[in-house]
Image (cartoon, rainbow, N blue to C red):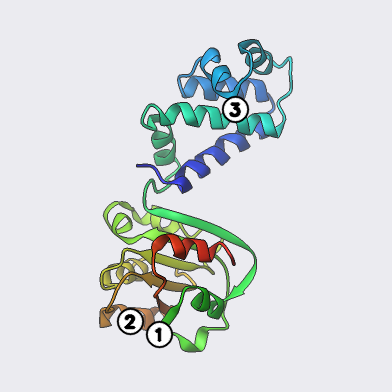
Amino acid sequence: MVSKYAIDLVAKEICGEIVWSDSPGQSLRKWREIFKVTQTEISQVIGVAPSVISDYEKGRRIPGSRFVRKYVEGLLYIDSTRGWSVVREIARNLRIPMTSVIDIRELSRGVPLRVFVEVLKGEVLWGSDYLDKILYGYTVLDSIESILSMSGAEFSAIMGLTTERALIFTKVGTGRSPMVAVRVTSQKPGAVILHGPRVVDPLAIKLAELDRVPLIVSRVESEDLLVENLRKL
């Protein structure tokens, strides 16, 4: 399995490199060859003649951003039919977590922590004095996948553009493992929100207090609803 987050990030990296290149046509060809896709295959997927692909790759046409996106989406679609072999390799090279990140978003404006608490039906376990703290993003993680598969470098990468964000863990048992992971990292999130536990380990609350990181339990009914509610922020 490859998360949508990983796929989107790989796509943005490739699109950015093509658009920023001094020779976009050569860059298109390079990525097509990296994905081991023929001109005929990509042309069939995106609905143009192979000659059009050839014109772009040879510089006879200059690709706009819409064409670049369509081209890269075509490469990704073909890779998906082959088990995501190339995307997996690129993601590993970029240190992008493959399966643990469910959603990640930078907010267009700062949002007080109390708003997160409201939309996620939160219960504050520690940090009630921090509810006016402003957060600028959030990351939703599968706690089991995170603990099992993420390296320290990958865990730091999921902070996004700023650490002033909510780190939200789903499928949580008691909350101890996520808070231990936060404890051993140098970068601390603006808040930690746990989804899933009926009872939270007292040690998790103690670790939150030691790191001065507000700890909240979300009582939203499902993971899908949690992500849906966050998207309204």
Question: Is residue 162 shown above or below 205?
Answer: above
Q: Amino acid at mark 1?
A: Trp
**Label 1 packing within 10 angstroms: few (<14), some (14-19), many (20+):** many
Q: Examine the rendering and report whether any part of residue 186 can be seen.
A: no
**Which residue bears the numbered disc 2?**
205
Furthest residue in direction top, as rendered: 51
**Cα gap from disc 1 to disc 3, whole angstroms:** 48 Å
Q: Amino acid at mark 2?
A: Ile
Q: Which label sits in the foreground, 2 or 3? A: 3
Q: Position of residue 197 (x, y in %)?
A: 30, 73
Q: Which mark is residue 71?
A: 3
Furthest residue in direction bottom, as rendered: 129
Q: Quadrant of residue 217?
A: bottom left
Q: Amino acid at mark 3?
A: Tyr
Identify the residue at image location x=30%, y=67%: 172
Describe the element under mark 1 as helix, strand or loop.
strand
Identify the residue at image location x=44%, y=70%: 188
**Which residue bears the numbered disc 1?**
126
Q: Examine the rendering and report whether any part of residue 202 can be seen.
A: yes
Nearest the eye: 229 or 173 = 229
**Cα gap from disc 2 to disc 1, whole angstroms:** 7 Å
Of the numbered discs 1 and 3, the one sitting upstream in the chain is 3
Q: Position of residue 213 (x, y in %)?
A: 43, 78
Q: Which quadrant: the N terminus? A: top left
Q: Position of residue 116 (x, y in %)?
A: 52, 74
Of the numbered discs 2 and 1, the one sitting upstream in the chain is 1
Describe the element under mark 3 as helix, strand or loop.
helix
Q: Which label sits in the foreground, 1 or 3? A: 3
Labels 2 & 1 near each other (Cβ < 8 A) = yes
**Label 2 packing within 10 angstroms: few (<14), some (14-19), many (20+):** many
